[in-house]
Image (cartoon, rainbow, N blue to C red):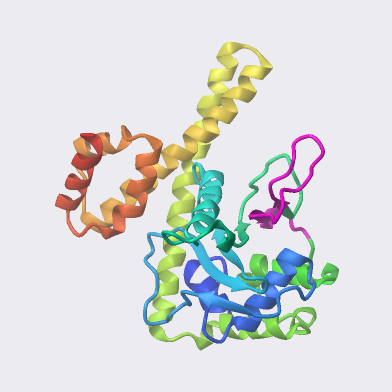
Amino acid sequence: MNFINPKTDFAFKKIFASDDSKDILISFLNALLYNGKTVIEDLEIIEPYSAANIPSLKDTFLDVKARITGNKIVIIEMQVLNVVSFEKRVVYNAAKTYASQLKSGEGYSRLNTVIALTIADFKLFPNRNQVVSSFTFTDGNDSFVYPDRPIELVFVELPNFQKDLSELETVTDKWIYFMKQTSSLETIPTTMGTVPEIQKAFRIANLANLSPKELEDFERQQMFLEDQRGAILKGIEEGIKQGIEQGIEQGIEQGIEQGIEQGIEQGKQEGQIRLILRQLDRHLGTISRDTQTLIRQLPLEQLETLGEAVLDFSSAADLTAWLQAHTNR
């Protein structure tokens, strides 16, 4: 028995956002947001997954939106790569979701809490070893919590979860293990199968239950993610090397540390450029050196925008028009 990787866009949405997945998503959210307590009794999945309309590969993150008990809105993002400015994107998406609740003329009393649940397949906070971290607005002096908790940010860092099967105790443990290890399993572990919703999630994730079209889309996403990971890691590796060299030239330990930090950020940006160029090469054919130079000169924000626009281009003329529009401002 083989299972699809729940960390891919296609698999995540198939498991957690299908028409038949409400009970799975309720169990998953109760486990990660409320330590397994039955706080969420019902929910409405907004924009559910449709097998006939699999999302574009241009989205490197996974996004499921649901309205839960208490009229709160939960947005779920599964991020497999530590891309530039990812932390800011999380805050932006949460704030945008909060603000977009109101239509023109509606009062602020209609605003409800937004919870942004982010599952990261990398260490998001390098100096912190917590598996689950939760943030909301608090006073900087005495940690008084802002009334009504308008926006909550919850992060699950999969690399910090080190338990093996024999150590799984809570439903929270089991769901995190499911997210981290499912693609490496060959059977449904007995200890996992005791949770009906997790057992059902395994059945949905079984490769044998996919149609040929679904299997093809899943494999394409796996290849795409590996390309992304390789490009970004290579960029970070080169950035760190350059940062260390710069720090050594300064001749002080602090200089080396600062050089490494700068190198990591530069490496992420270089990795993003490599990924965009690789996507363009596959999608449109060989890109001229002049065009590559223009892309490398783009500021970070425009690189991020271009990365999202790449798969919407149907010809080199589309790329040229995009660059002209964004470099002549």
Q: Is residue 157 magenta?
A: yes
| Position of residue 19 measured from the top left corner of the image (x, y, whole percent) | 52, 85
- Residue at (44% x, 47% y) in the render: 231
| Position of residue 174 measured from the top left corner of the image (x, y, whole percent) | 75, 72
Task: Give the vertical position of 85 relative to 151 (above or below).
Answer: above
From where the camera sits, is residue 238 visible?
no
Q: Is residue 278 magenta?
A: no
- Residue at (75% x, 73% y) in the render: 39
Near-viewer residue (311 or 73) = 73
Which quarter of the rendered picture does the N terminus lie within?
A: bottom right
Near-viewer residue (188 or 309) = 309
Task: Give the vertical position of 240 relative to 217 (above or below).
Answer: above
From where the camera sits, is residue 312 visible?
yes
Task: Give the vertical position of 149 relative to 68 (above or below).
Answer: above
- Residue at (53% x, 46% y) in the render: 86
Relative to residue 287, is residue 169 drawn left or right? right
Task: Give the vertical position of 294 relative to 14 (above or below).
Answer: above
- Residue at (57% x, 84% y) in the render: 204
- Figure label count: 0
Relative to residue 34, is residue 318 drawn left or right? left
Which quarter of the rendered picture does the C terminus lie within?
A: top left
| Position of residue 41 measured from the top left corner of the image (x, y, whole percent) | 71, 79
Relative to residue 251, is residue 232 drawn left or right? left
Relative to residue 47, is residue 285 drawn left or right? left
**Residue found farthest to the left:** 317
| Position of residue 52 measured from the top left corner of the image (x, y, whole percent) | 37, 82
Find residue 201 and report its image quarter.
Answer: bottom right
- Magenta region, residue range: 134-162
